[in-house]
Image: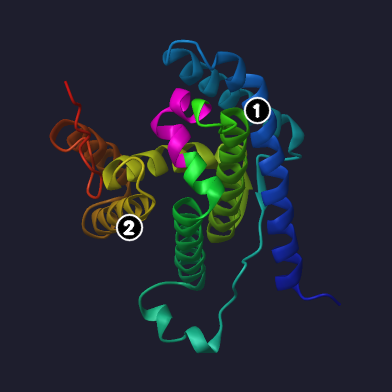
Amino acid sequence: GFPIGGILIVAALAAVIWCAAYGYTLEKVAYKPLRGAPRLSPLISAIGMSIFLQNYVLLAQTSDFVPFPRLLPEMEFLEYVNYVMGPSDFLILLVSTLAMVSLSLFIRYTRMGKAMRATAQNRKMALLLGINADRIISLTFIIGSGLAALGGVLIASHMGQVNFGIGFLAGLKAFTAAVLGGIGSIPGAMVGGLVLGLAESFTTGYFSGNYEDILAFGILILILIFRPDGILGKAKVQKV
């Protein structure tokens, strides 16, 4: 029959496409109507859509926990890696690195990537220069949702199960890692994730796993207080 690895790759691609379509739809429904609203309004809308999607999946699932197979089983050529990390950890590191490099190159060198940076920096000026800001924002949601789906597949494979709330804590920690590395810096988010992950691993190993979440959000508070620009973030200079 068809190898399980091939089936899971097809399933991962389907998840990316499905979630990208969800991201595009949510941007049109929950964000675009609030484009000119105060900044707090899109945040409240995002929280509402998050709760809606979690409960939607809860009602759609047949049980609270759905088993999920391993994407990368034990393999002989990874035997030396097993001393440091498991196969799923290695796969997460490999895929995340490839995704980070690809996204960085896309943002830096392609026309659409340059339009994204221009829109993020100054939407009104980007409109004056002929950039279709609405299309660029929609594309950003599509890419972000697709990458989130890829991350969800990797996390589910690592944990061996899928749950309707599995992404909530992971999303909060991803935000913590982005702030730690520097908002707006793709390599910074990767570095922030590694630093946060190592800190949690050492905390679990030397103390207890009950403290890892406390450490994660404690780091977030300290970074916001003492270095709000993050590890690789650049301070914004405002000209008067």
Where is residue 117? Give x, y as percent.
44, 41
Q: Is residue 204 left or right of residue 107?
A: left
Q: Quadrant of the C terminus?
A: top left
Q: Of the residues shown, which amino acid type is indicated by label 2? A: Leu
Estimate how packed mark 2 is, as few (under 14), some (14 to 19) or many (20 or more) residues with alpha carbons within 10 Å. Answer: some
Whole-angstrom CA distance, mark 2 to mark 1, is: 30 Å
**Which of the pair 7/189 is nearer the observer?**
189
The residue depicted at 17 percent of the width and 36 percent of the height is 222
Where is residue 87? Give x, y as percent.
50, 73
Residue closest to the far front: 129
Label placed on residue 26? 1
The residue depicted at 46 percent of the width and 26 percent of the height is 123
Q: Is residue 22 above or below residue 99?
A: above
- Residue segment shown in magenta: 117-127
Q: Is residue 80 left or right of residue 239?
A: right
Where is residue 137? Give x, y as percent.
56, 33
Q: Of the residues shown, which amino acid type is indicated by label 1? A: Leu
Estimate how packed mark 1 is, as few (under 14), some (14 to 19) or many (20 or more) residues with alpha carbons within 10 Å. Answer: some
Q: Main secondary structure of the magenta part?
A: helix
The residue depicted at 53 percent of the width and 60 percent of the height is 158
Q: Which residue is mark 2?
A: 194
Quadrant position of residue 104 = bottom left
The residue depicted at 51 percent of the width and 69 percent of the height is 91
Count how many numbered circles sit on residues in the image.
2
Q: Is residue 236 magenta?
A: no
Q: Is residue 76 left or right of residue 200?
A: right
Q: Is residue 77 above or below residue 233?
A: below
Q: Is residue 102 above or below residue 121?
A: below
Q: Quadrant of the N terminus?
A: bottom right
Residue closest to the far top: 37
